[in-house]
Protein backbone atom coordinates (compact mmCIF):
# COMPACT_ATOMS: atom_id res chain seq x y z
CA UNK A 1 0.00 0.00 0.00
CA UNK A 2 1.02 3.65 -0.29
CA UNK A 3 2.64 4.62 2.97
CA UNK A 4 5.10 7.38 3.80
CA UNK A 5 8.15 7.04 1.61
CA UNK A 6 11.56 8.47 2.44
CA UNK A 7 14.64 8.66 0.27
CA UNK A 8 17.41 7.88 0.30
CA UNK A 9 17.27 5.13 2.93
CA UNK A 10 20.95 5.59 3.66
CA UNK A 11 23.22 8.57 3.11
CA UNK A 12 26.90 8.92 3.86
CA UNK A 13 28.16 12.48 3.77
CA UNK A 14 31.59 13.94 4.29
CA UNK A 15 31.80 16.54 7.01
CA UNK A 16 30.96 19.91 5.55
CA UNK A 17 28.84 18.53 2.73
CA UNK A 18 25.22 19.60 2.18
CA UNK A 19 22.50 16.91 2.13
CA UNK A 20 18.83 16.82 1.16
CA UNK A 21 16.42 14.24 2.51
CA UNK A 22 13.08 13.66 0.84
CA UNK A 23 9.72 12.68 2.29
CA UNK A 24 6.68 11.63 0.27
CA UNK A 25 3.72 11.65 2.66
CA UNK A 26 0.49 9.76 2.18
CA UNK A 27 -1.53 11.54 -0.49
CA UNK A 28 -3.94 14.10 0.93
CA UNK A 29 -2.40 14.23 4.38
CA UNK A 30 -2.43 17.71 5.82
CA UNK A 31 0.12 17.34 8.60
CA UNK A 32 3.77 16.48 8.12
CA UNK A 33 6.40 16.07 10.81
CA UNK A 34 10.17 15.62 10.78
CA UNK A 35 11.97 13.86 13.61
CA UNK A 36 15.60 13.10 14.39
CA UNK A 37 16.49 9.87 16.16
CA UNK A 38 19.96 9.32 17.57
CA UNK A 39 21.12 5.79 18.26
CA UNK A 40 19.38 4.31 21.31
CA UNK A 41 17.14 7.34 21.81
CA UNK A 42 13.53 8.14 21.09
CA UNK A 43 12.68 10.37 18.12
CA UNK A 44 13.03 14.10 18.74
CA UNK A 45 10.75 16.61 17.06
CA UNK A 46 12.31 18.89 14.47
CA UNK A 47 9.54 20.67 12.60
CA UNK A 48 5.88 20.56 11.59
CA UNK A 49 3.98 21.56 8.43
CA UNK A 50 0.29 22.06 7.91
CA UNK A 51 -0.05 21.82 4.16
CA UNK A 52 2.68 24.18 2.85
CA UNK A 53 2.90 26.28 6.00
CA UNK A 54 5.71 25.55 8.42
CA UNK A 55 3.94 26.19 11.71
CA UNK A 56 6.55 24.95 14.13
CA UNK A 57 10.30 24.78 13.66
CA UNK A 58 11.20 24.92 17.30
CA UNK A 59 13.07 21.61 17.20
CA UNK A 60 15.54 22.46 14.45
CA UNK A 61 18.93 22.33 16.21
CA UNK A 62 20.62 25.10 14.27
CA UNK A 63 20.27 27.37 11.26
CA UNK A 64 22.06 24.70 9.22
CA UNK A 65 18.78 22.78 9.20
CA UNK A 66 16.09 23.87 6.79
CA UNK A 67 12.83 22.20 5.77
CA UNK A 68 10.28 23.01 3.10
CA UNK A 69 7.03 21.68 1.71
CA UNK A 70 6.31 24.12 -1.13
CA UNK A 71 3.18 22.52 -2.60
CA UNK A 72 1.83 20.94 0.53
CA UNK A 73 2.84 17.41 -0.39
CA UNK A 74 6.49 16.35 -0.76
CA UNK A 75 8.85 17.75 1.86
CA UNK A 76 12.61 18.13 1.89
CA UNK A 77 14.85 18.44 4.92
CA UNK A 78 18.15 20.07 4.07
CA UNK A 79 21.22 20.08 6.26
CA UNK A 80 24.03 22.41 5.31
CA UNK A 81 27.69 21.91 6.22
CA UNK A 82 27.02 18.58 7.91
CA UNK A 83 28.80 17.75 11.13
CA UNK A 84 29.38 14.44 12.87
CA UNK A 85 26.72 15.17 15.47
CA UNK A 86 24.14 15.28 12.66
CA UNK A 87 24.55 11.51 12.24
CA UNK A 88 21.13 10.03 13.05
CA UNK A 89 18.01 8.56 11.53
CA UNK A 90 15.68 11.22 10.16
CA UNK A 91 12.02 10.23 10.29
CA UNK A 92 9.11 11.77 8.47
CA UNK A 93 5.48 11.27 9.51
CA UNK A 94 2.17 12.41 8.09
CA UNK A 95 -1.38 12.46 9.37
CA UNK A 96 -4.71 13.25 7.73
CA UNK A 97 -5.46 16.37 9.76
CA UNK A 98 -4.43 18.35 12.85
CA UNK A 99 -6.60 16.51 15.28
CA UNK A 100 -5.02 14.89 18.33
CA UNK A 101 -7.52 12.10 17.83
CA UNK A 102 -5.81 10.68 14.75
CA UNK A 103 -2.73 8.58 14.20
CA UNK A 104 0.46 9.51 12.43
CA UNK A 105 2.09 7.33 9.82
CA UNK A 106 5.87 7.18 9.88
CA UNK A 107 8.27 6.40 7.10
CA UNK A 108 11.20 4.02 7.53
CA UNK A 109 13.59 6.90 7.87
CA UNK A 110 16.85 8.01 6.30
CA UNK A 111 19.99 6.99 8.12
CA UNK A 112 22.56 9.77 7.77
CA UNK A 113 26.17 9.06 8.60
CA UNK A 114 28.60 11.96 8.56
CA UNK A 115 32.24 10.93 8.23
CA UNK B 1 4.99 19.72 27.90
CA UNK B 2 3.52 16.86 29.88
CA UNK B 3 5.99 14.04 30.35
CA UNK B 4 5.64 10.28 30.51
CA UNK B 5 7.67 7.76 32.50
CA UNK B 6 8.13 4.16 31.38
CA UNK B 7 10.36 1.28 32.51
CA UNK B 8 13.44 0.95 30.34
CA UNK B 9 12.87 -2.71 29.55
CA UNK B 10 10.54 -5.64 30.13
CA UNK B 11 10.51 -9.31 29.25
CA UNK B 12 7.64 -11.60 28.45
CA UNK B 13 7.18 -15.19 27.44
CA UNK B 14 5.66 -15.90 24.07
CA UNK B 15 1.86 -16.31 24.05
CA UNK B 16 1.48 -14.72 27.48
CA UNK B 17 -0.13 -11.34 28.15
CA UNK B 18 2.08 -8.29 28.56
CA UNK B 19 1.23 -5.20 30.58
CA UNK B 20 3.32 -2.17 29.73
CA UNK B 21 2.91 0.66 32.25
CA UNK B 22 3.17 4.40 31.72
CA UNK B 23 3.01 7.22 34.25
CA UNK B 24 1.88 10.69 33.19
CA UNK B 25 1.12 12.54 36.40
CA UNK B 26 1.12 16.00 34.78
CA UNK B 27 -1.38 15.12 32.06
CA UNK B 28 -3.89 17.82 31.24
CA UNK B 29 -7.57 17.27 30.69
CA UNK B 30 -7.36 17.48 26.93
CA UNK B 31 -4.24 15.37 26.34
CA UNK B 32 -4.83 12.15 24.44
CA UNK B 33 -2.67 9.17 25.39
CA UNK B 34 -1.05 7.53 22.36
CA UNK B 35 1.04 4.40 22.10
CA UNK B 36 3.45 3.69 19.30
CA UNK B 37 5.97 0.93 18.85
CA UNK B 38 9.18 0.78 16.88
CA UNK B 39 10.54 -2.44 15.48
CA UNK B 40 14.26 -2.63 14.64
CA UNK B 41 15.21 -0.50 11.63
CA UNK B 42 11.63 0.70 11.18
CA UNK B 43 9.79 3.93 11.83
CA UNK B 44 7.35 4.08 14.75
CA UNK B 45 4.04 2.34 14.20
CA UNK B 46 0.71 3.36 15.73
CA UNK B 47 -0.71 0.95 18.29
CA UNK B 48 -3.63 2.61 20.06
CA UNK B 49 -4.82 5.82 21.67
CA UNK B 50 -7.48 7.03 24.10
CA UNK B 51 -8.68 9.93 26.23
CA UNK B 52 -10.54 8.64 29.27
CA UNK B 53 -12.20 5.31 28.57
CA UNK B 54 -10.44 2.01 28.02
CA UNK B 55 -9.91 1.19 24.36
CA UNK B 56 -9.55 -2.02 22.42
CA UNK B 57 -8.40 -2.71 18.88
CA UNK B 58 -7.03 -5.65 16.98
CA UNK B 59 -3.50 -5.01 18.20
CA UNK B 60 -3.92 -4.22 21.88
CA UNK B 61 -5.96 -2.77 24.71
CA UNK B 62 -5.39 0.48 26.55
CA UNK B 63 -6.39 0.75 30.19
CA UNK B 64 -6.51 4.31 31.52
CA UNK B 65 -6.59 5.02 35.24
CA UNK B 66 -9.58 6.90 36.54
CA UNK B 67 -7.44 9.92 37.45
CA UNK B 68 -5.64 9.61 34.07
CA UNK B 69 -2.25 9.84 35.71
CA UNK B 70 -1.25 6.45 34.43
CA UNK B 71 -2.14 3.99 31.70
CA UNK B 72 -1.28 0.43 30.69
CA UNK B 73 -0.87 -1.03 27.24
CA UNK B 74 -1.98 -4.65 27.17
CA UNK B 75 -0.83 -7.11 24.55
CA UNK B 76 -3.07 -10.10 25.07
CA UNK B 77 -0.77 -12.77 23.64
CA UNK B 78 2.78 -11.69 22.97
CA UNK B 79 4.47 -13.03 19.87
CA UNK B 80 8.09 -12.78 18.79
CA UNK B 81 7.00 -10.09 16.31
CA UNK B 82 5.92 -7.90 19.23
CA UNK B 83 9.53 -7.41 20.32
CA UNK B 84 10.00 -3.67 19.92
CA UNK B 85 10.39 -0.39 21.77
CA UNK B 86 7.01 0.84 22.98
CA UNK B 87 6.45 4.55 23.44
CA UNK B 88 3.74 6.15 25.55
CA UNK B 89 3.09 9.67 24.27
CA UNK B 90 0.81 12.56 25.17
CA UNK B 91 -0.42 14.65 22.26
CA UNK B 92 0.44 18.25 23.03
CA UNK B 93 -2.68 20.20 22.09
CA UNK B 94 -1.45 23.49 23.53
CA UNK B 95 1.47 23.83 21.13
CA UNK B 96 -0.87 24.27 18.22
CA UNK B 97 0.90 21.59 16.23
CA UNK B 98 -0.02 18.55 18.27
CA UNK B 99 3.52 17.22 18.02
CA UNK B 100 4.43 13.88 19.54
CA UNK B 101 6.97 14.07 22.33
CA UNK B 102 8.73 10.72 22.60
CA UNK B 103 10.58 9.52 25.66
CA UNK B 104 13.04 6.63 25.68
CA UNK B 105 10.25 4.02 25.72
CA UNK B 106 10.16 0.46 27.02
CA UNK B 107 12.14 -2.17 25.17
CA UNK B 108 10.05 -5.35 25.17
CA UNK B 109 11.84 -8.64 24.81
CA UNK B 110 9.71 -11.68 24.00
CA UNK B 111 11.15 -15.06 24.95
CA UNK B 112 10.34 -18.11 22.86
Image (cartoon, coloured by chain):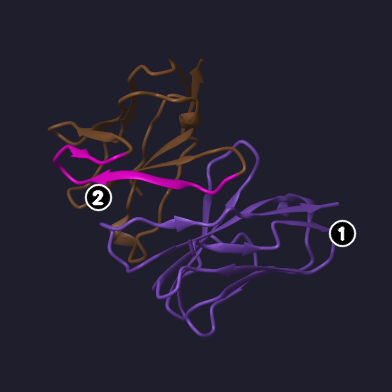
Chain colours: A purple, B brown
Quarter of the view holding residue B61: top left
Q: Nearer the viewer, residue A14 or B11?
A: B11
Kindly state the secondary structure of the residue where label 1 is placed: loop
Q: Position of residue A68 (x, y in %)?
A: 57, 77
> Residue drawn at (58%, 39%), measured in percent from left and top?
A41
Left or right, B40 with respect to B89, comes to right
The question of residue A71 being in magenta is answered with no
Kindly state the secondary structure of the residue where label 2 is placed: loop
The question of residue B46 being in magenta is answered with yes
From the viewer's perspective, is residue A52 above or below residue A66?
below
- Per the rendered image, the range of residues in magenta is B42-58
Query: Label 2 neighbourhood size at 10 Å, few (<14), some (14-19), many (20+)?
Result: many
Q: What is the chain letter for disc 1?
A: A
Q: Position of residue B46 (x, y in %)?
A: 39, 47
- Residue bearing mark 1: A14
Left or right, A83 with respect to B95, comes to right
Instruction: Kindly report the distance in space between the C-alpha atoms of the residues bearing marks 1 and 2.
Output: 42 Å
From the viewer's perspective, is residue A79 above or below residue B68?
below
Q: Which mark is residue B37?
A: none
Q: Position of residue A1 (x, y in %)?
A: 48, 61
Q: Nearer the viewer, residue A95 or A39?
A: A95
> Residue drawn at (78%, 61%), measured in percent from left and top?
A82
Quarter of the view holding residue A67: bottom right
Q: Residue furthest front?
A: A1
Q: Nearer the viewer, residue B13 or A13?
A: B13
Left or right, B36 with respect to A19, comes to left
- Residue bearing mark 2: B31
Q: Position of residue B30 (x, y in %)?
A: 20, 52
Query: Label 1 neighbourhood size at 10 Å, few (<14), some (14-19), many (20+)?
Result: some
Amino acid sequence: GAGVSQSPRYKVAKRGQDVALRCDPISGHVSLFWYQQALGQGPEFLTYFQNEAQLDKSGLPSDRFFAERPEGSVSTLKIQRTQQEDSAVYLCASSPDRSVNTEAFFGQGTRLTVV
Amino acid sequence: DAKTTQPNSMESNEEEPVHLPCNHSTISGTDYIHWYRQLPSQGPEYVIHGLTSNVNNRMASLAIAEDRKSSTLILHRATLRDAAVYYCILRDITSGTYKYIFGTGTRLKVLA
